[in-house]
Image (cartoon, rainbow, N blue to C red):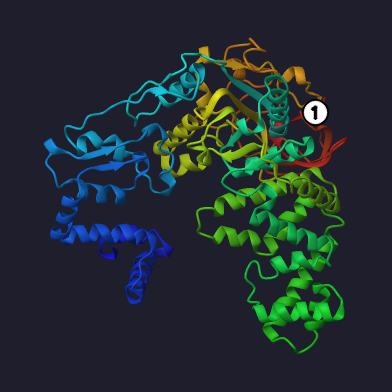
């Protein structure tokens, strides 16, 4: 309730207007005799607290109270439960809760893990029954999950064991040069599981930390004809923000694309009402011309108001300018400029919804991918083919989802991708929540590992494109926490060979590969072991070097990049270099991946 919100708390929201906005909102609900979803519980608590006689009625009505998934309960649910359960003395306690503290992964939406950790203190005399027999996974998989989660301080002690009594195959850890190599390998391994183990695609899942990681897997699956589905969300190119971005790009390239213009003409909001848009459509159809051409006619006449004409005139000028720039600007740079200048990126930055950060990450992933294309037309042609091939839905398909969406599911084979510091554990989670954030990320790892019934594969990439730049990645600290006797490491050497990998290099399951131990990830060629607790700058040989802001590189220098080969520096901006490579063309890279040619 508004009176219960302290001034320090309310000042944290809406530039200090949180208190006023909350009071006005609650008063509006009262005026409408309405309650929102959260208030249904809050008002119930208020009713019980202020009316002991009513609470007494419910004490008598409910003889027993059973709560499932207790680790996911929030503060309001906890207070409501305490009020209901306090009607009986401790000797006659009538409450039973079921939950797994190691699977509490929804702190970001209000779940409070302390509710289950302090249950015995809140309800003295409570009896704890540990359900330690696992009916899903084999011994090695459970050993890995248990070893990782044991590093959390805030947990109840328990030791899982497999009901089957079988150790099964060891968990396979595979490092790769880049995220594209990782996706190619996973696709190859899936084909191998189908061919050699007769596994159905429905029994295979790929679990990622962020939805932006899905794009590369979707691309390679479409190319290889592997059916897939995205759980808990749309496929990458079907997501709202991606379809909006593609609409802007299509109109820039082909100004007669009316469906795209209809989609984004008022996204972000430009003050164009439905009457204005309908007039544009009516003129276009009556004159048999594209909508953009109809707008050109309307802004020269008086049918529309002055404000609408000015808005539409500016929009037309933007598309004309972007179209002109497309001839001499790389697709990914043009896409960045269009999304910024249109206000589309700013729209999502200002959006306060929980999914806004994820949408921004997806847009960055789309723009990053465009670096592979020399012309906007080539990119749009590729997208058209991708959408055409992915339009069919199959009953037998690989499941791709985030770790959060995987809770409660199980598969014979699970691929856990992107085990790199900053990605998993998430740097944002660490920055915002400190050690509590780290422990929740570790619980995510526990959930991910235990989704597998027969085989679990963990992969990581040494390099990922982030914000348009190829950046180095350190192995996740969670890899250090895996037990060596339950893990096998692939013998794939880190390189930039890309498509040159052969299928023989991909045989990683323990029945194919006896290479061990886990430390080899850090000692592999070109990847010296670096502690993941604090990121460090690395040079072209992947050795630690002192941090600094002054680049040793200058325009005109001949340099060598491990992946793109030799080239000439055309521009230096801090640590960022624009290099004209002899074979790969112009790329933007970090100077930590470059060394001066001999």
Q: Residue furthest bottom?
A: 302
Q: For residue 152, say whether it is visible.
A: yes
Q: Closer to the camera, 136 or 560?
A: 136
Vertical placement of residue 434 versus 26, above or below: above
The residue to which callout 1 is attached is: 499
Q: Give the percent coordinates (x, y) of residue 36.
A: 38, 64
Crowdedness near tag 1: few (<14), some (14–19) or many (≥20) residues, C-alpha within 10 Å:
few
Compared with 324, 307 (above or below) is below
Residue 503 picture quarter = top right
Q: Establish if 360 lies above or below 509.
A: below
Query: How many marks can you see?
Result: 1
Judged from the image, the secondary structure of the residue bearing numbered disc 1 is helix
Camera-side residue of 499 and 309: 499
Question: What's the residue at 82%, 82% (across, down)?
Answer: 297
How far across and how far down the image is residue 591, in percent? 71, 36
Residue at 77% x, 30% y is: 563
What is the quadrant of the N terminus in the image?
bottom left
Quadrant including the C terminus: top right
Residue 585 picture location, percent across and down: 85, 40
Please tell me which residue lies in front, 102 or 550: 102
Image x and y of residue 411, in percent? 56, 30
Left or right of residue 14, residue 464 in this image: right
In-front residue for pair 66/289: 66
Q: With 474 as the anchor, is 178 left or right in this view?
A: right
């Amino acid at each position: 309730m508004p009176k219960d919100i302290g001034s320090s708390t309310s000042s944290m929201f809406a530039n200090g207007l949180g208190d006023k906005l909350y009071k006005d909102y609650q008063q509006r609900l009262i005026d409408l005799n309405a309650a929102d979803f959260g208030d249904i519980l809050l008002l119930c608590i208020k009713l019980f607290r202020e009316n002991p006689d009513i609470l007494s009625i419910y004490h008598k009505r409910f003889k027993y109270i059973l709560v499932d998934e207790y680790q996911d309960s929030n503060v309001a649910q906890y207070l409501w439960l305490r009020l209901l359960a306090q009607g009986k003395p401790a000797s006659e306690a009538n409450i039973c809760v079921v939950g797994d503290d190691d699977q509490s992964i929804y702190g970001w939406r209000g779940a409070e893990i302390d509710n289950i950790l302090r249950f015995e203190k809140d309800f003295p005399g409570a009896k704890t029954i540990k359900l330690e027999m696992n009916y899903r996974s084999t011994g090695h998989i459970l050993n890995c999950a248990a070893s990782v989660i044991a590093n959390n301080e805030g947990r109840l002690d328990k030791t899982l064991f497999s009901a089957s009594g079988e150790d099964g195959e060891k968990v396979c850890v595979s490092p790769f040069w880049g995220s594209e190599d990782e996706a190619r390998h996973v696709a190859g391994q899936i084909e191998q599981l189908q061919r050699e183990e007769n596994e159905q695609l429905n029994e295979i899942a790929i679990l990622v930390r962020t939805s932006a990681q899905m794009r590369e897997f979707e691309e390679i699956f479409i190319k290889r004809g592997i059916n897939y589905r995205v759980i808990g969300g749309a496929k990458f190119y079907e997501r709202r923000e991606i379809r909006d971005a593609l609409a802007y790009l299509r109109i820039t390239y082909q100004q007669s694309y009316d469906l795209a213009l209809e989609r984004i003409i008022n996204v972000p909001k430009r003050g164009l009402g439905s009457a204005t848009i309908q007039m544009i459509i009516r003129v276009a159809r009556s004159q048999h011309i594209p909508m953009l051409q109809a707008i050109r006619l309307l802004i020269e006449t008086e049918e529309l108001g002055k404000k609408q004409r000015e808005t539409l005139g500016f929009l037309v000028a933007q598309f004309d300018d972007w179209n002109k720039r497309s001839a001499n600007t790389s697709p990914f740079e043009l896409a960045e400029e269009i999304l910024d200048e249109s206000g589309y990126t700013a729209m999502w930055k200002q959006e306060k919804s929980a999914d806004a950060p994820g949408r921004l990450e997806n847009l960055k992933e789309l723009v990053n991918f465009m670096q592979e294309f020399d012309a906007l037309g080539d990119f749009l042609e590729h997208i058209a083919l991708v959408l055409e091939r992915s339009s069919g839905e199959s009953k037998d398909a690989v499941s791709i989802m985030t770790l959060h969406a995987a809770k409660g599911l199980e598969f014979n084979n699970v691929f856990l991708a992107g085990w790199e510091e900053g990605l998993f554990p998430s740097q944002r989670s660490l920055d915002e929540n400190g050690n509590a954030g780290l422990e929740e990320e570790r619980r995510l790892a526990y959930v991910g590992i235990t989704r597998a019934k027969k085989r679990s594969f963990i992969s990581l990439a040494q390099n990922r494109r982030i914000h348009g730049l190829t950046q180095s990645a350190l192995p996740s600290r969670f890899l250090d926490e895996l037990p060596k006797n339950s893990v096998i490491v692939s013998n794939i050497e880190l390189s930039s060979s890309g498509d040159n990998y052969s299928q023989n290099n991909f045989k990683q399951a323990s029945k194919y590969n006896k290479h061990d131990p886990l430390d080899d990830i850090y000692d592999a060629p070109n990847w010296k072991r670096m502690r993941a607790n604090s990121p460090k700058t690395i040079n072209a040989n992947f050795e630690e070097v002192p941090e600094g802001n002054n680049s040793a590189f200058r325009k005109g220098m001949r340099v060598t990049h491990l992946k793109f080969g030799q080239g000439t520096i055309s521009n230096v901006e801090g640590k960022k270099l624009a290099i004209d490579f002899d074979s790969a063309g112009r790329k933007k890279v970090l100077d930590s991946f470059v060394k001066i040619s001999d």
